[in-house]
């Protein structure tokens, strides 16, 4: 039995923009290649989703007793969550190896989080 990890990609505003600008072909080819490699290796447990830009978010949170709604992400950071998927691998070492291959690490980041098995 392997370990399951939620993999979250974080990208910069420039990386989000590359999805639609003159760099879009290279951007999407790199991601398709990465996901194909995970499928070929049979480690992709859930293909996940690509998220729209942070400014499309709506955040709901409690401010004392009041429930507040804010447009956009409340994360004030240069890197925002851009997508997520689940991998099933034998170890942290292999999970990290897959994270290092992600196109997001060039300017962005990958977060690995073990899934709590009930």
Image (spheres, helix red, strand yellow):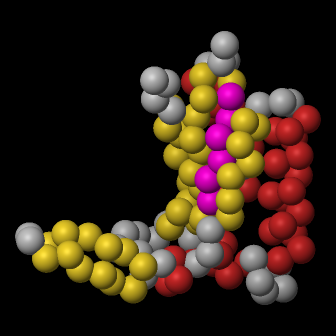
Whole-percent x, y for residue 79 in the image: 50, 66
Report the magenta stretch's main SS.
strand
Residue furthest to the left: 64
To which quarter of the image does residue 14 belong? bottom right
Whole-percent x, y for residue 106 in the image: 66, 58
Q: In the picture shown, does residue 42 fall above or below 76?
A: above
* In-image side of 113 versus 42 (left or right): left
Image quarter hosting the C terminus = top left
Seen at 20% across and 75% down, the residue is: 67
Q: Which residues are magenta?
A: 83-88
To which quarter of the image does residue 95 belong? top right
Seen at 62% across and 68% down, the residue is: 51
The one of 68 and 78 positioned closer to us in this rendering: 68
Q: In the picture shown, does residue 38 fall above or below 55?
A: above
* In-image side of 113 versus 90 (left or right): left
Q: Could you tell me if residue 107 is visible in this image?
A: no
* In-image side of 97 versus 71 (left or right): right
Whole-percent x, y for residue 24 in the image: 83, 77
Is 57 in the magenta?
Answer: no
* In-image side of 102 versus 108 (left or right): right
The one of 67 and 72 positioned closer to us in this rendering: 67
Seen at 58% across and 78% down, the residue is: 53
Q: Could you tell me if residue 7 is visible in this image?
A: yes
Is 86 in the magenta?
Answer: yes
Seen at 50% across and 32% down, the residue is: 114
Count of numbered circles in the view: 0
Image quarter hosting the N terminus = top right
């Amino acid at each position: 039995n392997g370990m399951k990890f939620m993999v979250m990609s974080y990208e910069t505003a420039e990386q989000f923009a590359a999805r639609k600008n003159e760099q879009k072909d290279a951007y999407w080819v790199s991601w398709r290649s990465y996901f194909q490699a995970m499928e070929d290796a049979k480690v992709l447990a859930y293909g996940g989703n690509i998220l729209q830009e942070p400014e499309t978010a709506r955040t709901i949170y409690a401010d004392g007793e009041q429930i507040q709604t804010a447009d956009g992400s409340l994360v004030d950071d240069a890197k925002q969550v851009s997508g997520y998927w689940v991998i099933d691998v034998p170890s942290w070492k292999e999970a990290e190896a897959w994270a290092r291959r992600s196109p997001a690490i060039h300017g962005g980041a990958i977060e690995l989080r073990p899934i709590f098995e009930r």
